[in-house]
Amino acid sequence: MRARFLVAAMLAALAVPASAAAALEVKLSVLPARPKVGARAVVQVRPYWTYKRADGSCCRLVAADANYPFKVEAVSPTGRVHRIAVHRTRNRYVWAGSFVFRTAGRWTVRDPQWGPRYSPHYGARPRILVTVRR
């Protein structure tokens, strides 16, 4: 009877999700940082885990080898949303996709899975502003 209880407790512990002390976050970047209208730009997604440091201070970032369906969007200055397909690169910690900004102005590149408020965690950048020049 006691062995059954122990096995049941171990199975329950495996079924319960791990602590939220380490949360998946992302950093977005656009290369070049200030793209030109009509030129192809590369959008990168870098997933990572955040951990509290041993002393309790925030935070330690660790690159994450995440197999996750990232959904990246570019929002034009007029509010039109464009999907950016990203795929894993040779570097297992980087996902990338290309996009052509069709108008000049201030665009928002975002991963809507972290919206609508987006992550306030240290190091997280699931939404960035990109100035597109003529």
Image: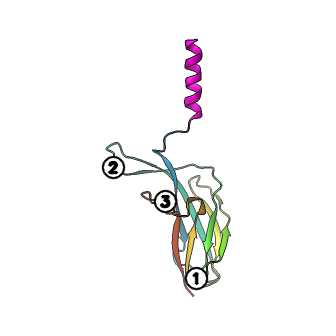
Residue 88 position in % (x across, y down): 64, 56
- Please give the residue where the numbered disc 1 appears in the rendered image: 36
Give the answer, above or below, for where 119 lies relative to 104: above
- Please give the residue where the numbered disc 2 appears in the rendered image: 57
Say which residue appears at 52% left-offset and 78% top-offset. Answer: 34
Amino acid type of the residue tagged 1 in the rendering: Lys
Say which residue appears at 39% left-offset and 51% top-offset. Answer: 59
Give the answer, above or below, for where 122 lies relative to 7: below
Give the answer, above or below, for where 45 lies relative to 61: below
Magenta residues span 1-17
Mark 3 element type: loop
Query: Going by the image, does 58 lie left or right of 16?
Result: left
- Please give the residue where the numbered disc 3 appears in the rendered image: 119
Query: Going by the image, does 22 lie left or right of 42?
Result: left
Mark 3 to mark 2 CA distance (whole Å): 18 Å
Give the answer, above or below, for where 43 lies relative to 50: below
